[in-house]
Amino acid sequence: MPSATKPSQRLVPLFAQQPCWMIEPLAAELQYSIPSVRRFLTEVGYYSSFTHNGGWYTLRSIPRFGRDGLWFYHDIGFSRVGSLTNTLVDLTTRSSAGMTAEQLGDKLHCRCHSILVQLCRHGRLQRQKLTRSYVYLAVDPGTAAIQRQALAMRSLPPAQLPAEIAVLVLAEFIRNPESDFQQMAHALARSKSVTVEVAQIERLFEQHGLKKTM
């Protein structure tokens, strides 16, 4: 007598046992052809991985995506927007100041230099040279303009301290040579009501050839 359970419904307990499957073992477990299993997955709803050439599958109800739209099961990565190319475009477009290939690779746990180049060639991203690497930006002109502005602000060196403030910083260093830059900034704010950025103190020490561990 045929089972009343639809083949697609049999996927749910299998994915409860193991949240990610490749198509061949899944088809063997269900005893159906690979095209049939793909159809069952479509009926239930699924994500394919952006890692491993899209070879892993999970049901749409399983991933708990983070704010960046990513979910990992061990080294298998899934994205709310699907493929690796879509994910690269999505992450880059939503970033405040663009992203380098290294930053994207660290976030996605995979190398993506060549794919980013192709996305630029196909008009889905653009890029800007920054020192020795490229920063990838959104293709939308308005979004890219905001990203370029934020990138330019990040690239500016910290403002140089006025001489009288520099004297206070160096005096604080002499009094408390064991303090790090953050502690020195807090001490000056507390005792002298002077606001000094950590980067400004760091730059001052570099100018005077002073060594201090952050």
Image (cartoon, rainbow, N blue to C red):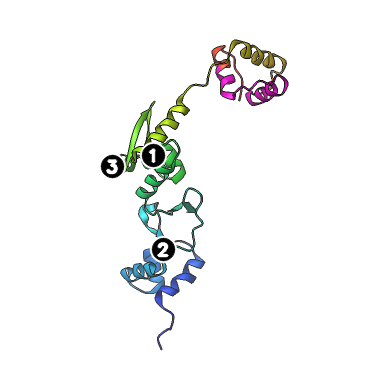
Q: Does 103 lie within the magenta span?
A: no
Q: Residue type at mark 1?
A: Thr
Of badges 2 and 1, nearer the viewer stands 1
Magenta span dominant secondary structure: helix
Q: Is residue 102 left or right of residue 127?
A: right
Q: Which residues are magenta?
A: 180-203
Q: Does 190 lie within the magenta span?
A: yes
Q: Position of residue 37 (x, y in %)?
A: 36, 69
Residue at the extreme front: 142
Mark pair 2, 1: CA separation: 31 Å
Q: Residue type at mark 3?
A: Gly
Residue where numbered disc 2 is placed:
46
Mark with earlier residue (2, 1): 2
* Disc 1, SS: helix
Mark pair 1, 3: CA separation: 15 Å
Disc ID at residue 123: 3
